[in-house]
Amino acid sequence: MSRIGKQPISLPKGVDIKLDGSLVTVKGPKGELRRRFDPRMTVKNEAGNITVARENEERDTRALHGLSRALLNNMIVGVSTGFTRVLEITAESVGYRAEMSGKNLILHVGFSHVVDFPPPSGITLGTDPKTRTITVSGVDKEVVGETAARIRKVRPPEPYKGKGIKYQGEVIRRKAGKSGKTGKGAK
C-alpha cells in the first residue's frame, strides 16, 4: 500500500467536495477547483475524511495512488488557504525592479525594453519595492508554480555577478570569472 495514498485527508471547515465518478469538484472560501482522476482510483467521502483507493496492485496503478491523493490534497489546501511563491530580485541587480500596472507585472531587468507580464486567470501578482520581491498567489498549486517559473525565466540569476530573479531562499552558485579573478564580485 502506498504510504502517501493510504492516508486520509481531513476536510477543513468551509470546504465542500462533490464526487461525480472520476470527476472531483472542490469548493472553498478561496475558489473552486475541478480535476478528473484516473478511473482506476476511487475517491470516497466518509464523514469528512476523504480517502483514495485503487482497484488493483499493478505497478502503474500503485504509482497513481499516491499521486492522486497528493493532487486531491493540493486541491483542498488550495481552496481553503491558497498557495504562494515568492521571487526576489537579487541585491546585486542594480537598477532591476518590478512594479504593478493594473493586474500586469512590469519588469525592468536590464533589457532595452520593459517586460510586461499579464497573469493567467486565477493568479494574483504583487510586488514590494522595498524588499524587491514578487509574490505569486492562487488556488491551483500547479499554475502558481508555473507562473513563478515563467517570471523567473525572464531573467534567471547568472553565476558571475548574480544578477537576476530567483526564488526566495534559492542559493545561486557563483563562478570566479576569467582566469580565476578574485575581487569584489567573486565569492
Image (cartoon, rainbow, N blue to C red):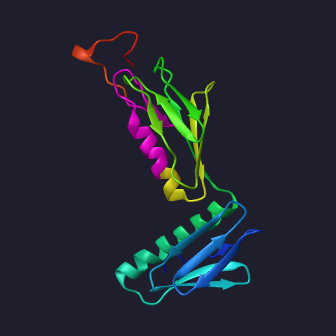
Res 168 seen here: no
Is 167 within the magenta? yes
Horizontal and vertical percent position of residue 161: 38, 20
Q: Residue at x 53, y 52 (%)?
A: 144
| 12 on left or right of 149 | right
Q: Residue at x 40, y 23 (%)?
A: 110
| 61 on left or right of 134 | left
Q: Which residues are magenta?
A: 146-173
For this orientation, the residue located farthest to the bottom is 55
- Number of numbered discs on residues: 0
Horizontal and vertical percent position of residue 36: 49, 77
Q: Work out whether residue 154 or residue 100 is closer to the camera in this orientation and state it.
A: 100
| Quarter of the rendering containing residue 100 | top right
Compared with 115, 67 (above or below) is below
Horizontal and vertical percent position of residue 68: 50, 74
Is 150 within the magenta? yes
For this orientation, the residue located farthest to the front is 102
| Quarter of the rendering containing residue 136 | top right
Q: Work out whether residue 100 or residue 149 is closer to the camera in this orientation and state it.
A: 100
For this orientation, the residue located farthest to the right is 13
Compared with 154, 124 (above or below) is below
Q: Work out whether residue 23 or residue 170 is closer to the camera in this orientation and state it.
A: 23
Q: Work out whether residue 116 or residue 180 is closer to the camera in this orientation and state it.
A: 116
For this orientation, the residue located farthest to the top is 183
Q: Residue at x 73, y 68 (%)?
A: 12
Specify the quadrant that holds the C terminus. Answer: top left
Res 119 seen here: yes
| Quarter of the rendering containing residue 149 | top left
Horizontal and vertical percent position of residue 119: 52, 47
